[in-house]
Amino acid sequence: MADTPDATLNAWKIAWRRAHPAIAGVEKVSQSSGRTYWQGGLWRDIEDAAIMAVQNPGEAYAAGFPGRGVTFKKAGSFLWCQLPSKRVTCYPYPKLLPGMYQRDQLTYMCVPGENDKGKIIADVKNANNWARIATYGGSLTENIVQALCRDLLVDTMLTLHDKGAQIVLHVHDEVVIETSEAGAEAARAAMQNIMRQPREWAKDFPLWAECNVMTRYGKG
């Protein structure tokens, strides 16, 4: 994958977006610039809600499937995003700036990572470890999905802990526990059952998990 040409990767990306209009929207071409953009879909709904919240501080704007969506609200210097778990994430010092396609783009301050360098926007407060970056619906959705998955994992780990499981580590979407060899199969079955049960706030979420018994950590 690391040696795959950029043109091929971009073609895969475009093909995925075209195959999922409910998420990415419908492909459009700007009459003024001739550039391709995407209209409608979940990404645009989330972006619209975030922008409306910045434009109207104190007002809440929801996006996403009812019961599984998020709510944006600007309070103080932050744009807050409430997740289905009711936990909130934030975007410091949000600001709307002119973007492409005659549309404002959402920007905020953060500690830029390696992948953020191309998104940095000029700002007098920018520094090596603090800068304004631009974002859009697809990136906001990624933030939400990552945060949502974290909440699912942490809630499951707390349940496992309450049941007496000896958690030794977790890796991305995996949880590793230690148990006796004699009780390994029973522990596996109990753990798998717990990990397949949605939390109360995640009712009807399509969760699934498969647990394996190993003598040392590895990919099952």
Image: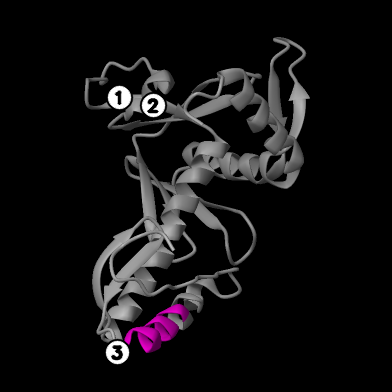
Disc 2 residue type (three-letter): Asp
Picture coordinates of residue 204, whole percent (x, y): 61, 74
- The answer to whether residue 51 is visible is no
At label 2, counting other C-alpha atoms closer than 10 Å, the crowd grade (few under 14, some 14-19, many 20 or more) is some
Q: Nearer the viewer, mark 3 or mark 2?
A: 3
N-terminal label among 3 and 2: 2
Name which residue lies at 50% across and 23% down: 3
- The secondary structure that most of the magenta stretch takes on is helix
Give the secondary structure at mark 1. strand
Q: In which quarter of the image is residue 214?
A: bottom left
Q: In this view, does 18 lie to the left or right of 54?
A: right
Distance Cα–Cα, label 2 vs label 1: 10 Å
Q: Which span is picked out in magenta? A: 182-192
Q: Mark 1 points at which residue?
A: 131
Name which residue lies at 49% across and 63% down: 84
- Give yes or no for contact between labels 2 and 1 (Cβ–Cβ under 8 Å): yes
Disc 1 residue type (three-letter): Ala
Distance Cα–Cα, label 3 vs label 2: 49 Å
Q: Name the residue under label 3.
A: 182
Most foreground residue, 60 or 62: 62
Name which residue lies at 44% across and 84% down: 189
Image height check: is 93 above or below 142? above
Picture coordinates of residue 179, whole percent (x, y): 26, 81
Based on the picture, tell me whether residue 188 belongs to the magenta stretch: yes
Q: Mark 2 points at which residue?
A: 116
Q: Nearer the viewer, mark 1 or mark 3?
A: 3
Disc 3 residue type (three-letter): Ala
Q: Is residue 1 left or right of residue 184?
A: right
Name which residue lies at 56% across and 38% down: 138
Give the secondary structure at mark 3. loop
Picture coordinates of residue 55, whole percent (x, y): 51, 36
